[in-house]
Image: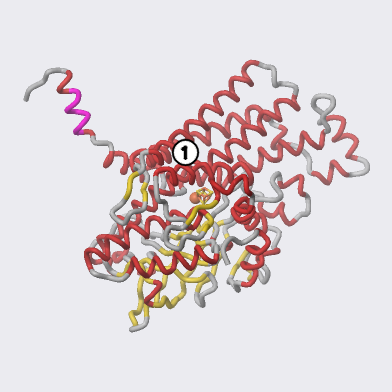
Amino acid sequence: MSLMTGEEYIESIRKRKMQVYLFGKKVEDPVDDPILRPSLNSVRMTYDLAQMPEYEDLMTAVSPYTGRRVNRFTHIHQSAGDLVKKVKMQRLLGQKTAACFQRCVGMDAFNAVFSTTYETDRKYATHYHENFKQFMIYCQDNDLTVDGAMTDPKGDRSKAPHEQADPDLFLRVVERRPDGIVVRGAKAHQTGALNSHEIIIMPTISMGPDDKDYAVSFAVPMDTPGIFMIIGRQSCDTRKREGSELDVGNAEFGGVEALTIFDDVFVPNERIFLNGETEFAGMMVERFAGYHRQSYGGCKVGVGDVLIGAAAVAADYNGAARASHIKDKLIEMTHLNETLYCCGIACSAEGHPTDSGNYIIDLLLANVCKQNVTRFPYEIARLAEDIAGGLMVTAPSEADLRDEKLGAYVEKYLKGVSGVSTENRLRILRLIENLTLGTAAVGYRTESLHGAGSPQAQRIMIARQGNLQHKKELAKTIAHIKE
Ligand code: SF4
Ligand code: FE
């Protein structure tokens, strides 16, 4: 089998018996839960679009390992052109879902683990690269969604993994057996874990020799015994249970995150990609983070397109579209959004091969990309709220709009320009609310800040990659300074 249809994907997830908890209770049927289902629909879009001939070039690629066509989300980048297509694909999916479609973390983990295992094997004669390749081909051939899990809870940030009061605050190996390892710990903020067939674990920081048990990377199915997920609360999440599609703003798509717990999980030898080679933990982290910082130059831009469009529609419905300051705000939003896209494309176009042969982005430019993502969506969201007006947060519910007595008043007093129904005006405002303050704000705002590493993490990389010495030399040459 190769590419799954969206429907086949949904049914394949239904078959995995994952342990999911929400509001203190086990969810027996996560696929049909109203709070969780929109996030599954977002991933489904990565399957649906791959079936459409017009998107084949963006959404799929031919695997050099099998010669078969695979979903790009399981592809190992073979050129800078592949890196560019990745960003374009992510923008497209952001436009189609206005949410986090989750599957990128697996793609980014694939490419980081591919090159890091190659270099680890070269130094230690280990077998990790072949292990990974077998796993990758299995995922490609079965068109699986893979979660890429990096972020440990981290406890006291001033302490290394082995120094923590509770040794489980970074995921670690607790037992080594002839046939594999047993791991314990947790990965926080796991976007898409719930909707993934498999999960790749990676370390979260560079490590020293004392952190041997923490320098571990592997992949297991999401329904492996010992793994369970506690779903995060989101602003306005229970609106999805109320039955009003209008009040939700984006009823079809969304994203959820999970605190994913590994309670003594067995990992067989053939699924291990790093096990104690501490000096390669940092390389894996840096590469995964670099790829995911590139990713944000695609996905957030696509969601930004929807938000800019929503603000423009709100302006139309308010009768304000011709005001010069509104036009200027829409220009500013577009400028900011396209600047992010420029960064995503630039770090991709400047990509280069690693020793293993796959392509990696320009790390400096990818970190600049993500640093801008920590700021611009906030300004785009502020301008969208400015254009939308206060009604975005004070409008009555759909129940009032439909009420026999109140409905007529809501219709009358919340009407904008003639020719546009009050309902449509409320719909567009709810979408802006969803993106800036509701469930999707997790993905568009706070995730823009902290996802793929908080702002300071990029600044450290920018300092490291910025080559200040070279710039000093340039200045001294121009100024004819001889020291
Ligand atoms: Fe993909 Fe963006 Fe979600 Fe990351 S935040 S998984 S890049 S959609
Ligand atoms: Fe993310």
Q: Is residue 446 above or below residue 328?
A: below
Residue 44 % position (x, y): 63, 56
Instruction: Name the residue: 33% across, 45% down.
Output: 352
Q: Is residue 222 above or below residue 279?
A: below
Three-letter residue code for mark 1: Val
Residue 40 % position (x, y): 63, 58
Task: Inspect the magenta stretch and tell me whether residue 471 lies in it.
Answer: yes
Quadrant of the rendering where the C terminus is positioned:
top left
Q: Indicate left or right for 258 with 279 as reference.
A: right
Residue stretch rendered in magenta on the structure: 469-475
Q: Nearer the viewer, residue 237 or 225?
A: 225
Q: Is residue 95 among what the camera can see?
A: yes
Residue 33 % position (x, y): 69, 63
Instruction: Name the residue: 76% across, 49% down.
Output: 245
Q: Indicate left or right for 132 with 69 as reference.
A: left
Task: Inspect the magenta stretch and tell me whether residue 438 lies in it.
Answer: no
Q: Is residue 449 above or below residue 1?
A: above
Q: Which residue in the structure is indicated by mark 1?
A: 373
Q: Nearer the viewer, residue 372 or 167?
A: 372
Q: Nearer the viewer, residue 153 or 47?
A: 47
